[in-house]
Image (spheres, rainbow, N blue to C red):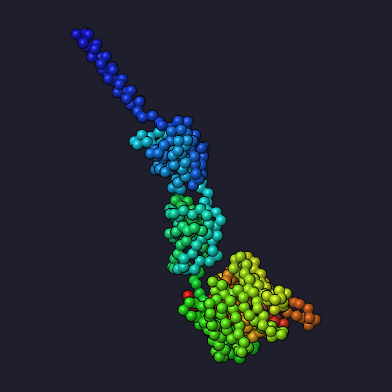
Amino acid sequence: MKKLISMMLMLCAVITFSACSSDDDGPSNPVSNPTIPQSAKIGAEVTIQGTGFAAGQTLWLVPEQGEAVNVNAKMATSGAKFTVPYTLNEGKVDVVLQVENNKWTLGSMTLLAAENPITAISVPSGLALGKEVTIAGIGFAEGDKIVLIPVVNAAKPYMIDKTPQGTTIDATVTADGIKFTVPADLTEDEYTVSLVRGKYTWALGTTAVYVDRRIESITISDHMMLSEPLTATFHYNNDGALEKITTNDQYVWEFAYSGNTVTVAPVMLPLEKLTYTLDENGRITSSTGFSMQTGEEIVYAWNYDAEGHLVSIVDKANAESQENLTAKYENGDLSEYNLIFTNNFTTDKSIRVCPNTTEPAYLVNIFALMMTREDLFLGFLLNRNVTTSTYVPNKLLAGDLNENSEIIQNEAPIETGFNNNTLTLKTTGMYISAGQSMLANTVTVKYQNK
C-alpha cells in the first residue's frame, strides 16, 4: 500500500513538472541581437537591426498611453525598416514583434516631434475663390489635408480639439505638389496655409484669398481737360479676352484676334494698327507703337521677372530709348516706374489690388497715357495673367522739371477706397507733373466678378 501511494505521488510530480515546462518552453523570440535607436522623429524612417526578421512578422509601436500602432515594417534577414506613423504622439514607445498570436518586446525608443516633411514649398501669393490651385513642394502624401486659417486667427492656439480652427480641404497629390479647390464660400482675406498629416500641423506660408475679377469700366473725372467724366466700358468675348472698349464720347477700340496676335486701330492714329503678341497665358510678349518724336513704328519687348511682374517695355532696336518703360517692385509692390521721368510710389497696405487686373499705379495717370502713349494705355488694359502689386499705392512722387530745368519730384497723396467692387484713386490740386502732362483727377475702376 505504501509503495502504491509513493508511486502515485511521483506520477503527480511528473505531471505537474511537465505542465510547467510546457508554458516556459513556448515559441521563442525569433529575432536575436536587436538594435533599436534610442530615439526617432515622428515621420522619420527607422531601421532596427538584428537577425531573424522575416516575412509574416509584424512590428508594433506601443505607447505608454494610447493604442498600439502597426508600422507595416519591411522585413529583411538583417533588420526591419519602417516610418514612424504621424498618428503617434511624442514620448516613449515599446517595440513589439508579433508572429501569429505570439508577441515579444524587443526594446523601447523615444519618439521626438515631427518636422515639416515638405521641402521646396511654393505657396501662390493669391488663391481665387472656387478655382483649383496647386501648392508646389516635395514630400506630400496621400491623405494630407490643407487647412486655410485667417491670419487674424492663425496666431492663436488652434489645436484645441486636435482640429485647426480654419477650413479643412481634401487635397490630391500631384507630380509637383498638391492640388485642391478653394472653397467658394470663404471670405476675402489673408490666410495661413497649413498642412495636416495625422496629428500634426505645419504652416506652409500665407496667401490672399480673393474673388477673381476683371475691369468692367474706368471713369475719369475731376480732370481739368475734361468737361464731363469720361467712362471707358470694357467688353469681353466668350473666352474672357478683351474684345472692345467704348467710351461715352464715342472713342472705340476693337481688338481683333488671330492666333497669338492681337491688332487694334489707335484712336489717335486711326489709319495705323497697333499689334500685340501674346503667350499661351494671354500675357503680352511684344508690341508695336509709334515714336513720339519721329512717328516711326517701334517694336517693343515686354519683359517680366520671376514672379510675373511686368518690369520693362523696351524698344528692341534701342535699349536706351527714353520712350522705354522700366519698373521696379519691392516687397511685392510697384515702387517705381520710369517713362522719361521717374515716378515713385508708396503704400499703407490698406487696400489689396485685385489680382490679374491692371496695375493701379498706371491708372492714376491713365488719361495722359491714353493721349500720349496709346500703345501702353491699351497694352496695360489688354494684358492678362500678369502679377500685380499686392497693395494699392497711397502716395505718388512724380518726376518733373522746375523753372531751372532741374529734375524734381512732386508729392501727390492718393486717396483710395474700395467699396461695392469699385476702386477709387483720387489726386487733388491741378498739375501733379507738368513735364508728364499729369493732372490731378479721380479714377474710378468698377470691377465685375468673372
Front in this rendered view, residue 100 or 346: 100
Residue 281 placement (x, y as % from top left): 54, 71
Residue reaching furthest to the top: 2
Decide if residue 225 is on the left or right side of residue 29: right
Decide if residue 239 is on the left or right side of residue 399: left
Camera sees residue 421: no
Residue occupying image coordinates x 49% and y 34%? 35
Residue reaching furthest to the front: 259
**In this view, 241 is above or below 247:** above
Name the quadrant containing residue 341: bottom right
**In this view, 145 is above or below 393:** above
Residue occupying image coordinates x 53% and y 79%? 258
Front in this rendered view, residue 310 or 299: 299
Residue 240 placement (x, y as % from top left): 49, 77
Front in this rendered view, residue 253 or 428: 253
Residue occupying image coordinates x 72% and y 78%? 322
